[in-house]
Image: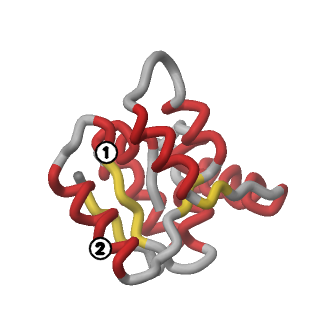
Amino acid sequence: MLDTGALIAFERRKRRVLALLDTAVATGLDVRTPAAVVGEFWRGDHRPDARELLEAITVADTLELARRAGEALAAVRHVDSVVDALVAALASQAGDRIVTSDPEDLSALAHWFGRLRVLAV
């Protein structure tokens, strides 16, 4: 599961995120993100390989996902990012690992949802 910071880290060619994505592809893992992450990321100019990465990511959103994200925001009061809540809610569906450049809020959300690991890049 990628958040906006992970996409930015990919575009900046950060070693850790590149290694994580290479491992995910090599092992056949599905790389996912909510559409809100793509919207938050897709401002301004981007490297051509950023577009290729986005085409390889599964983008998923549902009403249920939005409801669960809202519940998390209500429960974890110091987190106010709907995008982070969507990332955690989507990740919780399959117990995904969350790849982020900002682990503090996502760790709090991961704790609320349970079964999630947050990997900082």
**Circle 2: residue type:** Thr
What residue sits 28% from the left and 65% below the top? Answer: 20
Which mark is drawn over residue 10? 1
> Crowding at label 2, few (<14), some or many (≥20) Cα neighbours within 10 Å?
few
Looking at this view, name the residue that lies furthest to the right: 63
Q: Quadrant of residue 27?
A: bottom left
Q: Is residue 119 left or right of residue 88?
A: left
What residue sits 57% from the left and 50% below the top? Answer: 55
What residue sits 25% from the left and 35% below the top? Answer: 12
Q: Is residue 29 above or below residue 57?
A: below
Q: Is residue 18 left or right of residue 40?
A: left
What residue sits 65% from the left and 55% below the top? Answer: 59
Instruction: Say which of 29 and 61 sits in front.
Output: 29
Secondary structure under the numbered disc 2 in the rendered image: helix
Q: How many marks?
A: 2
Which mark is drawn over residue 99? none
Secondary structure under the numbered disc 1 in the rendered image: helix
Q: Position of residue 103 (x, y in %)?
A: 31, 52
Q: Position of residue 82 (x, y in %)?
A: 60, 41
Q: Is residue 80 left or right of residue 23?
A: right
Q: Return the residue at label 2.
A: 23
Q: Position of residue 83 (x, y in %)?
A: 57, 42
Among the two numbered marks 1 and 2 on one chain, the one whose residue lies closer to the N terminus: 1
Q: Is residue 63 above or below residue 13?
A: below
**Circle 1: residue type:** Phe
Q: CA distance from mark 1 to mark 2?
A: 14 Å
Q: Quadrant of residue 11?
A: top left
